[in-house]
Image (cartoon, rainbow, N blue to C red):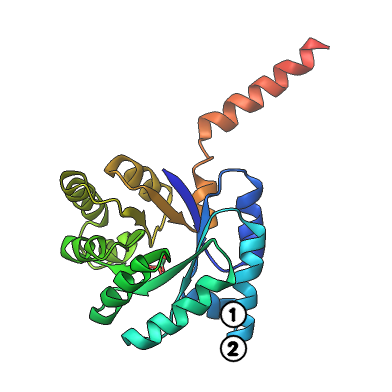
Amino acid sequence: MKFFIDTANLAQIKEANDLGILDGVTTNPSLMAKEGISGEAAIHQHYKTICDLVDGDISAEVLGTTFDEIVAEGKVLAALDPNIVVKVPMIKDGIKAIKWFTDNGIKTNCTLIFSAGQAILAAKAGATYVSPFIGRIDDSGWDGVQLIKQIAEIYAIQGFETQILAASIRNANHIIACAEAGADVCTCPLDSILALLKHPLTDIGLAKFLEDAKKLG
Ligand code: E4P
């Protein structure tokens, strides 16, 4: 399973990248706004900076919602760097645009996926990635990981090549469950990635080893 970091914060991206396990980055308009980035030029520059930091796929979300707007914006975003993946919402014009990008060799991430039907449509259009939002599904009383499992089964049966990018991750258990359920990629906040490191028995064991190491001279 590939690891992406789900943030537009450059310090967090650097920290995750320094671990040596990072395969890419996802952003969205809310994450960009959180960093105080506004205006087309600043947004584009921010994507370029992220592409310079990380060697992997970088999702950049379009803001338009019509076919013409999505295609026009996506072409500009894709021209910023070869690693840019155009992130497109799961709407009717979004699906049409994903098909256009597929036919023109531009990678896409179909975002805001909440059902297996949506994942089938995105795969039919040739999306590189689909992003089921598992945390938001859990928040609404459904089972996000179950959706990952269902999509993985359907894609395997049908031979779809679209990669399942588990998004809206809330904790380390989500990452483990997504790996088990067959996600190709998990995009995680930094604290969920770092939480994977932790186990109290590791801390206790290391403290004992360090104490005994002093006896070794
Ligand atoms: C990433 O591609 C998604 O936009 C993101 O994971 C959504 O996360 P949230 O549900 O925590 O906002």
Say if residue 176 shows up in the picture. yes
| Rendered location of residue 206, percent (x, y) | 63, 26
Find ligand 1 in the image and state its quadrant.
bottom left
In the rendered image, the vertical position of residue 164 relative to residue 209, given as above or below: below
Name the element at disc 1. helix
187 or 41: which is nearer to us?
Answer: 41
Determine the residue located farthest toward the right in the rendered image.
217
Examine the image and state in which quarter residue 101 appears.
Answer: bottom left
Examine the image and state in which quarter residue 65 appears.
Answer: bottom left
Q: List the residue tagged with mark 2.
A: 39
86 or 200: which is nearer to us?
Answer: 86
In the rendered image, the vertical position of residue 215 relative to residue 207, given as above or below: above
- The quarter of the image holding the N terminus is top left
Residue at figure coordinates x 24%, y 68% from the top left = 140
In the rendered image, the vertical position of residue 82 relative to residue 34, given as above or below: above
148 or 176: which is nearer to us?
Answer: 148
Residue 43: image tag: 1
Contact between marks 1 and 2 (CB within 8 A): the answer is yes
Name the element at disc 2. loop
